[in-house]
Image (spheres, grey):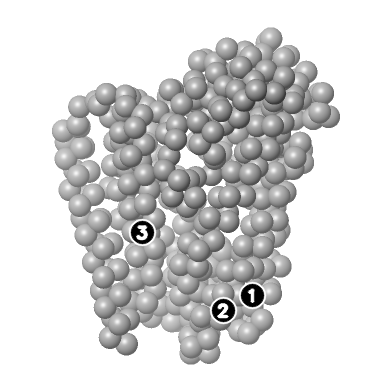
Amino acid sequence: MNLRKLLLGVGTGVAAGYALARAIEAVGEWTAPSPPREKNAAAYAALRRRLEIADAARGIATFTAFSFGPLGDRFDAATSRAPAWLRPALFFLPFALASALADLPAAFVESYTLERRFGLSDQPRRSWLGEYAKSSLLGAALSALLATLLGAAVRRAPRRWPWLASLGVLPLFVAANVVVPLYVLPLFNRFEPIEGTLEQRLRALAQRFGVGDAAILRMDMSRQTRKANAFVTGIGRTHRIVLGDTLIAAFPDDETEFVVAHELGHYVNKDTWRTIALGEVLAATLFFAANAASRGDRERLRERPLLVARIYARMLLATQALRPLLFAFSRSREWAADRFALDATHDPAAGAAAFRRLRDQNLADEDPPAWYEFFFASHPSLRARIAALEAPG
């Protein structure tokens, strides 16, 4: 018990100290913004790595301290008079909103201020705050929904709930891949069909692989960033290949075609379904692991949303052990998409040039440390990808 109190105290202290430091920094940046910095990819990448690691540690410490500390007990007690089915939503909705408010200073410093100082964004503060509010409200609503579903499974089948949750997560993954591209992303950006000679070139490429009816869209990414990007979303008839306007404006057609061929590789190789399958396996693994670790709480807290919070906290901790597997899978699919693009375009020079242009425009880390790639990188290093394209034969 003393060890638990010590760990809770450390977690609470880390979360509170980090939040306070970022709040002070955010106030300073709001009243007197720091001057722009030289566009140095190495410096930007090093800062990004530190912030990403600190943010991950802070998130784990914050939620764990909340779930096992006195604040979680108070939130739990506040829901005691509500119907059992409603308690998880009443527990998680205010927590998610309060967390978003508490995280605002850190997000402002880590997302808005850093990007502005390195010349990667000129988004107005009001626009950034509006998008943060929208994403926070959506996240809170989703947290309440998922907590309600998980709470119902735990309450009705306290020993068999991991089986129910594992079965239930699959349709949720599928629904998310339909709902997000059609209804969520348009809340933040405008999507328009690409027209003209570029559309004809890209459509011809898609038709060669039996996906000529896929939506190929332009996204006004310049609203948020000067970085270039393209991605694929959705499944079935909702599948979309999306190019940022920042990419279209900066890349010549042959490089754009290689980037789109890469995205088509994800589409043709059914990487969305592969990702859903992996997500299902990982979710089931986490459900069963959390259930095994929650035996002491299971009967005592069966009707209380605090049990759901503690299950999620244990899942959050267990996820860290699975990070290498998840990111290794992601990198393998990126390599497969690169090979597809090369086979589709027969233009390795355009591919290498596109990667270099992405590196320069995005201030991307060309060759991150091996430990970072192992634990955090969803894509292989640009240096390795360029070398593979330029290799003889």
Q: Residue at x 62, y 62 (%)?
A: 282
N-term mark: 2 or 1: 1
Task: Provide the residue designation for mark 3.
Answer: 57
Residue 162 - label? 1
Choose between 221 and 77: the one closer to the eye: 221
Circle 1: element type: helix
Q: Residue at 20%, 52% (x, y): give it.
A: 21
- The answer to whether the residues at label 2 and label 1 have Cβ atoms under 8 Å apart is yes
Of all residues shown, which one is farthest toward the top? Answer: 197
- Residue 237: x and y in percent read 76, 38
- Secondary structure, mark 2, is helix
Neighbour tally class for label 3: few under 14, some 14-19, many 20 plus, Cα within 10 Å: some
Percent across and percent down for residue 299 are: 53, 89
Q: CA distance from mark 2 to mark 1?
A: 7 Å
The residue beneath circle 2 is 291
What's the distance in space between the residues labelled 1 and 3, CA to CA? 26 Å
**Hey, what amino acid is under mark 3?**
Ala
Q: Quadrant of residue 390?
A: top right
Look at discs 1 and 3 and give the one toward the viewer: 3
Is residue 101 toward the left or the right of residue 285 in the image? left
Question: Which residue is depicted at the point 66% across and 50% down?
Answer: 275
